[in-house]
Image (cartoon, rainbow, N blue to C red):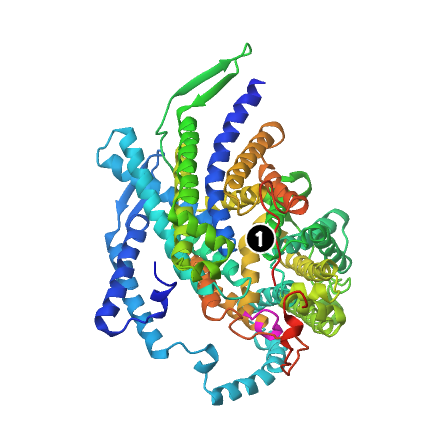
Amino acid sequence: MTAPSTHTTKPATGIPALLKTGFINAVIALVLFSLMVGIRTEAGSEGQLTYWTRFGELASLVAAVFGGSIVIELLRQWIGPTGAEKLVPPAVQSGMSFVGRYLAPALLIFTLLVPVIFYNQRYILDLAILVLTYVMLGWGLNVVVGLAGLLDLGYVAFYAVGAYSYALLATNFGWSFWICLPLAGILAAFWGVLLGFPVLRLRGDYLAIVTLAFGEIIRLVLINWQTLTGGPNGVSGIPRPTLFGIPLNNSDEGLAAKLGIEYSPTHRIVFLFYLILALALLTNWVTIRLRRLPIGRAWEALREDEVACRALGINTTTTKLTAFATGAMFGGFAGAFFATRQGFISPESFTFQESALVLAIVVLGGMGSQLGVALAALSMIGGFELFRGLETYRMLVFGWAMVLIMIWRPRGLVGHRAPTVYLKKAQAISSDLVKEGHG
Amino acid sequence: MDYFAQQLINGLVLGSIYGLIAIGYTMVYGIVGMINFAHGDIFMIGGFIALITFLILISLGLTAVPVILLVVLLVSMAITALYGWTIERIAYRPLRHSFRLAPMLSAIGMSFVLTNYSQVAQGARVKPIPPFITGGYTLHESQDGFVIQLSNIQIMVVITTIVLLAIFTWLVSRTRLGRDMRACEQDQTMAALLGVDVDRTISMTFVIGAALAAVAGLMYLLYYGLVDFFMGFVAGIKAFTAAVLGGIGSLPGAMLGGLAIGLIETFWSAYFSVEYKDVAAFSILIVVLIFMPTGLLGRPEVEKV
């Protein structure tokens, strides 16, 4: 047997080698797709299966793989094994840092003005609210994943807890949104602690699976506990939010009547827009503040090196727990907002896909970077809207995007937040200090 | 008592299927140290390929059941193994020295790709097949008319599992490949220095895991008579639970855990409620990880800096 990985380091050169690579890949693709794409099965009307062949699609897919692998191979040879930072020339980099400095304030001002600019375009307003909801969720999860480095695959569970808390409290007891909002957050945080306390001792990927299982448990309980949650039918007739007791409707008590202006249903949309914007900015503000506190520093330290943290006397379990609970609380707020905006919720809104989407936003945004997460949410949800017609291909592209981002830019497309405090100067440590038995 | 015995049989059969999937998780985790989140979907792909091969063979006019079964088994193992190999090559190998969460996230992405790929390629509707292996034995009939049935398909599932496990155990403990795998599990760098082709060994791990998952997919198809594009998700989590319960990294543990999960799920459905059977399985995962993080047969993990 030869030395390891000789075939990965040796680049293929020349046209015959290229063709050979392409040909091998095409043959692999042919085998992979032969049955799954080349033959289409469908259940007939009487339960029997029928099938038909699709060799045209098969051939074009294989051809695409052939061409694609040659193109990728060529690109790899031209660009060479350079680091990602070399791809961007210094001039562009300095320009980008200039843009980066003013991008956040500019975006914020633009966001504040969105309802003014697009007042008559209901579709854009709705989309903006959706994007902001995901920005908030992303920022909430960012505390857990980006700052503390805990992979949480069940974030949607806290979103669901928040949504159902508000929906049930409001429909059963008639409590107003402003009382329920903090309650929803507290309940979600409580669930976060309840789950987190025992499982946060686990190492990274175990934690991921446990949170995933927890998310599924919450969803299954919501589906099956019909007397409380209405099961798959969900909860409907959730009250709309009020401006501190003043409803935003067409009645004499409504805001429009009180202000003496003509009522329009857009008022409510604009109100919702500013509500979620305020909630999201609250999340952002709290995160930025927390990052400067000892607990935030501890989160970042934990993300970088858990063993070192423990050696320095940081109680990792409580540190993780606070991150988990904080993230869960913001998830709960977002859930309450979601419930009041939709007026109807069902377990269908809280599937694993949702968790993965929020996680992808955080990862794409470059774990820990607030601006990155906001931009990622914008591009992700915006991209989903663009591909609305191609419903089935959407998740396929989404999955590929996650894989490719991990391969090319594992620290995120937009940016990566380094720890807030960092030793700038490398310090030499004498070798006799680190030798085994001493360090 | 009769009811209990019947549930025991059903649970063991279901447990065999979970065990076959769990081996894939535990092997990959043992060697690469990542949770291959897409493994459940590999199982689903295996089921689909088995279904399509069945259709083709039957429409070609083949009637000999053993021949059909053998061909289907081999075809679906081969193609699914290639899926496992390709996925490792595309999505995991470039990330081997990346940061901790990267392979896991890439695996989640791959899981979405596979789920939606089969939805796009084969449609979203459930694909049923007519019962292919029929008949069975009545083991015992009580006075009140309750019959303990042992169907041929159940016998086949259990026997296939035992045979595969025997082959697999031989492979790991007696062959060159198995030795390489165990060496990589202990220390990849050292194994590479001693002339073990680490990349190839890891590839083979994925190939074997996928082939076993394909068998599980075929068994599932024969036993339940249907496949759909979403079945890999829940089955995958349960098989992972089984791997953890048995002690991740331990091969007999995976099988034992699979049987345990199958039994728990079946008895829970039989005596408590069908709706909450998944909740029961997932709760067990959480409880096991809290109180017995090393599982039934696992070794305690040493944290290295």
Determine which quarter of the picture holds residue A64.
Answer: bottom left
| Extent of the magenta region | A365-372
- Chain letter of the residue beneath label 1 in the structure image: A
Badge 1 density bin: few <14, some 14–19, many ≥20, Cα 10 Å: some
> B113 and B162: which one is in front?
B162
Quadrant position of residue B100:
bottom right
Determine if the magenta segment contains residue A371.
Answer: yes
Name the one closer to the observer, A200 or A269. Answer: A200
Side (left or right) of A115 relative to A319 = left
Q: Position of residue A258 (x, y in %)?
A: 76, 68
Q: Secondary structure at mark 1?
A: helix
Viewer can see residue B121:
no
Residue B179 counted in the magenta span: no
Residue type, numbered disc 1: Ser
Q: Say if residue B175 shows up in the picture.
A: yes
Q: Quadrant of residue A367?
A: bottom right
Q: Is residue B215 left or right of residue B106?
A: left
Instruction: Identify whether A291 is placed above or below B217.
Output: below
Viewport quadrant of the C terminus of chain A: bottom right
Report the residue at 66% width, 55% height from top. A158
Mark 1, residue position:
A349
